[in-house]
Amino acid sequence: MVQVVMSGNHASSYAAKLARVQVIAAYPITPQTTIVEKLATFVASGELPAQYIKVESEHSALQACIGAAALGARTFTATSSQGLLLMHELLHWASGARAPIVMGVVNRAVAPPWSLGTDHTDTMSQRDTGWIQFYAESNQEVLDTTLIAYRLAEDPDVRLPVMVAEDAFYLSHTVEPVDVPSQDDVDRFLPPLARAFAVRPGETQRYGSFVGPELYMEFRYQVAKAMKRAAHVRPQVEEEYRRITGRHHGGSLAAYRVDDADAVLITMGTASTTARSVVDTLRARGKKIGLAKLRLFRPFPVDKVCELAATVGRIGVMDRCYTYGAAGPAYTEVVAALFGGLHRPIVRNFIAGLGGRDVTPEAIEEMYESLLKDRGPEVEWVGLKRRKGVTTHG
Amino acid sequence: MTSYETEEDLPDAPIASEPTDSIKTASWRTFRPVIKLEKCTKCNVCWKFCPDVAIEINEEGWPVVLLDYCKGCGICAEECKPLAIEMVKEEG
Amino acid sequence: MARLTIPAEELMRPGHSACPGCGATLVMRYLLKGLGPNTIVTVPACCWTVIGTSFPTTALSVPMIDCAFEATGASVSGLRAAADALGLTDVTIVGFAGDGGTADIGLQALSGMLERRTDAIYLMYDNEAYMNTGNQRSGSTPLGAWTTTTPVDAESRGKLESKKDMMAIVAAHRPAYAATVNIAFPEDFVRKVEKAKRITGSRFFHALAPCPPGWRYSAEKTIALGRLATDVNVFPLYEVVDGRYRITRKLGRVKSVAEYLKAQGRFSHLTENEIAAIQSEVDAKWKRLLELEALG
């Protein structure tokens, strides 16, 4: 194990290299580009003997990975924002075809207007596509989670594609010290991809096929079951990763000082780091508050959310995006998870940080203050610039 | 052919692996080719141009129509130079 | 007994769902005879998606990988990369797409595949419209043709634009090999495929696939009509090897395009002037092809 100061993007590249990926589909888009550029240097030097396809669009990038996965190769691609949206059709294809692709996604706002700032709209828009979705808080997490993603994706009980999301610029372009596991450690954790399910030349096989109403539902039910199994396989995989590297990032919903909390904020991505320091600040002032970092969005950790609700009376969910005509998607899923459960805490939605707007400690303090009040709006856009006298909820 | 009725019968991924030989497309046709061997020159053109792989050349070199599959398109009759093939209406 | 003039092995099975007299099935049949069993075919949305039949059956004895409509070229590149990564160096990867999926929505992915010099074959089978969805015009529909989106009425005279020249577009990418093939000439077809199989680099085929319901003619005429297309110079047979053009079939006396047009219901509305315009276009293209061949 070696400690290297590197960006979140390079953490993604190093993980793909350690995973011994065999086929990489590369297309540039800010702020993902340095992921594939770093991989290009690994391939060019011979350190990574992978096939590096310089595709001509993101849509083609994912199609190339699906084709490669069909033959049984380990694949990797990365994208962001508009590129991810362009891939949408193939995201559905990858999960339906049970292709164990791993993709790095740098969370960036979608146009119009053009924005390079971080925002979760891109990956949240893909929550229906049957991909396992992780949100990383640090560059270390990006590297570790990408390796975990391969193990999880390729597990014979799972066989679903996985995306690892990281916030634009805060992670993608900011350097942090990252512990890089040795190739031996990674080889122990991640064996070569078993070709048991691959298409073989010379055989009568049609991969994809087409079907009428009499069997389509059953094929799709298989994907649903695989996602359910993923929820059970993931903790085992992350435990094994901890055994080998000593690191664990808290599971699907990582709790911080929630035990006697009156109010807990659920956050995703880098806002969690800021929120954690606000928790310490407010705790020092006597406020009983905590934080739960939502790390796994698909499959959604219903049980962990219900567990939280058993002891906490007020939950705020911070969304770094918004579903127009509804509310923040993470908030909506938290409420849905709680509806069938025993406990009904107050749940509020805070929309913040869209388009790279900085989520400051002050903004988070505001969220906790709001959460601790008896009454408050169900959905609140925090930090929105409005004329005085106009309320900020939406 | 394996029967696929329930979700448990399905393969783990959408992969079809039964050859279409089990699907008899005979019912598609209205006309059927009849080969008059006395005119046939064993040129193999009918075998060559059949879009349904529904003509075989047997061990003696004669073309044989696979009536399980023939859709009655008539290409074989049209292309047969010695006019050895006639399209005959199916009964019923 | 005449010996077989094309390989005997059948890698396309009977029982598929193609229309009677379908040209596209013979394209697949001859392609696979030329390539042999160590082949993987990737197919986007097109007639062959349906011809291949629904789950659990498949009409090919080689693996068929379905892909998204726009992305055949990318699917080919991904399959080739995986085959190379996994040491399957002998397998031939083929993209097999219709004219809509190549000349229109699939053009970018094909261009990418060619520009990257992906070591694979791409075959466009051309029934000259979006036939799987019921005959809507594509960039490859010929001038004057009736289709459902270029109907014939007071304000519309069929397709107003000329057919997109895919061979020229492909040739501009300088592939290792490009050729037109016609199911009416199976020996030429298979010979070109066998030749392409031995070449490394990107190889492209433009295959004419006459379509009885779409072109509106009686099914038994598929081969005859295909033959006529070449004999009137509407679909000349030629290959491009390292940028050099070589016409592979030249008739002493070329027939007039009217004979070809009048054999198809999709052209039945054409006036003598419109037919003459089409004849001029055919003559100009043939002249251009001869000039390209003369460049050597």
Image (spheres, rainbow, N blue to C red):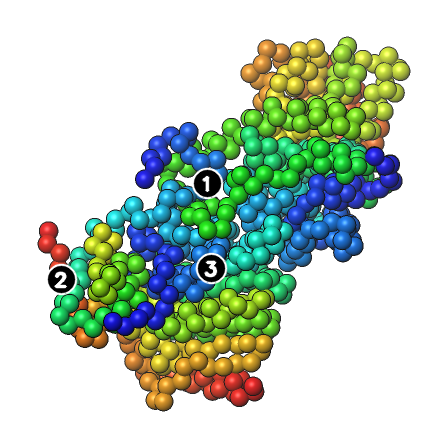
Q: Quadrant of the C terminus of chain A?
A: top right
Do discs 3 and 2 belong to a common subunit? no
The chain to which mark 2 is attached is B
Please report contact status of discs 3 and 1: CB closer than 8 Å, yes or no.
no
Gap in Å between the C-alphas at discs 1 and 2?
41 Å
Q: Which chain carries label 1?
A: B
Which residue is disc 3 drawn over? C96
Say which residue appears at 46% left-offset and 68% top-offset. Answer: C193
- Residue density around tag 3, few if under 14, some if 14–19, many if 20 or more, within 10 Å: many
Q: Which amino acid does label 1 sit on?
A: Pro
Residue at 47% across, 31% down: A221
Most extreme residue toward the front is: B60
Q: Mark 2 points at which residue?
A: B88
Where does label 1 land, which residue?
B14
Looking at the image, residue A106 sits to the left or right of residue B58; the answer is: right
Q: Position of residue A371 (x, y in %)?
A: 74, 19
Position in image of residue A117 (x %, y %): 76, 43
B27, A130: nearer the viewer: B27
